[in-house]
Amino acid sequence: MTGSADSPTFTLAYVPGVMPAKWVGIWNERRPDVPLTLLQITAAEAPDVLREGRADAGLVRLPVDRTVFSAIPLYTETTVVVVPKDHLVTAADEVTLADLADEVVFHPLDDVLGWDQPPGEPGFERPASTQDAVELVAAGVGLLYVPQSLARLHHRKDVTYRPVTDAPQSSVALSWPEEATTDLVEDFIGIVRGRTVNSTRGRRPQPDADPTPGRAARQTGGRTAGQSGGKAGGQSGGKAAGRTGGKGRAGTAKSGGTRRTGRPRRRS
């Protein structure tokens, strides 16, 4: 949770399968003055963790209660089926639910796809976790539908996975309590939205801005005025002098010419 006003901190919760490293890296570059702490939680824990203020924001799976939480969808994951490495499914690049209709399918208690019951034959039990379900798949007693990131998270040498083209999908979002939209939360929103440090929508002034109000403007104005005045004065003076000097030389030449072109005196 956010620290004191003198020593603020930012806590980011995240659910299994989500990789927050990219955003954390950007935060550390832009806000080195505010330490960011990561808190790994289960998808089921996310609402209570955010509501109770144990984290400032979270990378969670949709849906969320929109009467309490704000959410910015980030991406939607492909759903895959996890199978033993020697399963017939591995001969295809992707499959449909109909292709697996006769298979035994496990439905873990921490399922994030929102099934009432996954298509296929129900497993002999509901595993407590996705990890437990993957172990049962490795034993060759059933299959498992999960977002691709969870299949990667629980990867084993004796299992693999294939995309399922028509299965429900899971979306990941940045979420936080609507009534707790702090400046630090706004900073993190800017990061996940891909705003640059110089974005006009950014909340904080740029670090290289002059802290003295009006100083940059006075310096800029002074340089501009001096440069403009000097240049204009030099150009105007030079042009005026050139024109005046030119006319003077022309007048003298003309006058001399007139004397030379007068009728010569006759000598007696």
Image (spheres, rainbow, N blue to C red):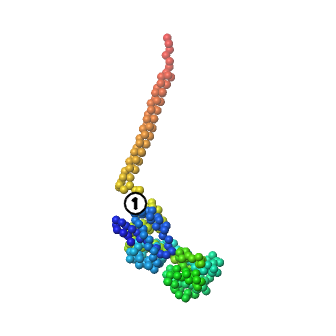
Mark 1 lies on residue = 205
In the rendered image, residue 180, in percent from the top left (x then y), is placed at: 38, 72
| Quarter where residue 101 is shown | bottom right
Q: Decide which of 249, 181 is in the foreground and name it.
A: 181
Q: Decide which of 152, 95 is in the foreground and name it.
A: 152
Please name the residue shown 40% across and 44% down the image. Answer: 229
Please name the residue shown 39% across and 68% down the image. Answer: 9
In this rendering, is residue 133 above or below 182?
below
Please name the residue shown 50% across and 22% down the image. Answer: 260
Query: Is residue 158 left or right of 73 when viewed as pictured?
Result: right
Type of amino acid under label 1: Pro
| Quarter where residue 71 is shown | bottom left
Numbered-mark total: 1
Q: Residue furthest top?
A: 268
In the rendered image, residue 161, in percent from the top left (x then y), is placed at: 59, 77
In the rendered image, residue 95, in percent from the top left (x then y), is placed at: 61, 79
| Quarter where residue 36 is shown | bottom left
Q: Decide which of 176, 157 is in the foreground and name it.
A: 157
Residue 199 visible? The answer is no
Query: Is residue 223 left or right of 165 when viewed as pictured?
Result: left
Answer few, some or many: residues within 10 Å of disc 1's Cα (few below 14, many 20 plus, some between 14 and 19): few
> What element does badge 1 sit on?
loop
Residue 226 visible? The answer is yes
Q: Decide which of 244, 157 is in the foreground and name it.
A: 157
Q: Quadrant of the N terminus?
A: bottom left
In this rendering, is residue 187 above or below 144?
above
Please name the residue shown 48% across and 27% down the image. Answer: 253
In the rendered image, residue 11, in percent from the top left (x then y), is placed at: 41, 71
